[in-house]
Image: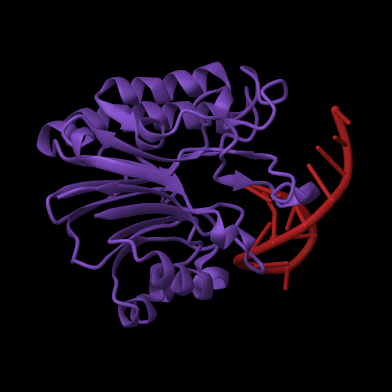
Chain colours: A purple, B red
Amino acid sequence: MKIASWNVNSLNVRLPHLQQWLADFAPDVAALQETKLEDARFPDDALAAAGYRSVFAGQKTYNGVAILSRESARDVQIGIPGFDDGQQRVIAATVGDVRIVNLYVVNGQDVGTDKYAYKLRWLEAVHGWLIKELLAHPRLVVLGDFNIAPDDRDVHDPAVWNDEHILTSTAERTALQKLCTLGLHDAYRLHHDGAGEFSWWDYRQAAFRRNLGLRIDLTLVSDALRPHCVAAGIDREPRTWDRPSDHAPAWVELAG
DNA sequence: ATGGTAGAGGATCTA
C-alpha cells in the first residue's frame, strides 16, 4: 500500500500535474494540501475518471485538504474535534485497515507573530486529538505538510534555518517531537540517514535548481505500522515539471 | 534586513 502526501498549491492549477502523477506513481492513497478550492469546485469527477475517490474539505483562496483513494474512504473527520478553526487544514479517514490523518500544519509566518502562536496552539490541539485517535486506530498514518523541518539534515543551510527561524525553531521542533513521542515515526528516517533530500523549495532564487530546500512534508507511521513500513521517500519528479507546485510528494509504502 | 516568485483575486495576503 503506497500512501503519499502532496501540497499541490492550488488544485485548480495543478490538476493536470496531479492526474499525470497519479498515473505515474499510482499511490493507493494520496493526501493533498493547499487545494485552495471551495468544495463545490473540487474536481472529483475528473479524479474518479483517474480511478480515485475523493473526500475533501476546502475553502476559497487558502488552505484546503483532501484524501484520494482507490478504495473508498470511511469515517471521514474534518477538522480537529473540539478545536474551533476557521481554516480547513485537517481531514482524516479510514482506507482499508489504515487510519489516515492528513494535516496542513499552520506555516506560522515568523517566530513571535500571532500566526506563530496559532501554529503552536494548533499543534497542541493535534497532539490531544492524536492521543485518542491512536487508541481508536492503532494502525495510523499521520502525514502532510508539517511546515517543520525535523532536524539539521532536513535543511540546506542550518546556519540560516536555526533554532530561532520559522519552520526550524525549537518550539516547533519540540511540538513535532511531542507528536512522535505518542508512538509515531518519521517513515523517511526509518529508511534514510542522510542529509540534503528535500520536499519543498522556494519558487524564488532558482531554489530547486540549486537544491536550496527543506524536508517539511512528512509521513509518520504508528508503532503498530512500523514493522510493515518497507520503504519511504520523496518523488522529486513533479517538481521538475512546467509550472510546478513548490512541494514534491512524500510517500511511504506499507507491506501487507 | 530585504527581496526574490507563485497563487488567488482583483489590493494585498499568504507562503
Q: Residue at x 68, y 47 (%)?
A: A202
Is A100 above or below relative to A192?
below
The x, y position of residue A204, in whole percent, is 76, 49
Is A242 above or below relative to B15?
below
The x, y position of residue A69, in whole percent, is 27, 64
The x, y position of residue A59, in whole percent, is 45, 61
Q: Residue at x 46, y 67 (%)?
A: A21
The number of discs equals: 0
The x, y position of residue A35, in whole percent, is 48, 61
Q: Residue at x 58, y 23 (%)?
A: A152
Residue A9 in sight in this render: no
Is A49 above or below relative to A125?
below
Q: Nearer the viewer, residue A202 or A197?
A: A197
Placement of the N terminus of chain A among the 4 image quadrants: bottom left
Q: Nearer the viewer, residue A222 or B9?
A: A222
Residue A101 in sight in this render: yes
In the drawing, does residue A240 fall left or right of residue A232?
A: right
Is A72 above or below relative to A40?
above
Q: Residue at x 12, y 50 (%)?
A: A97
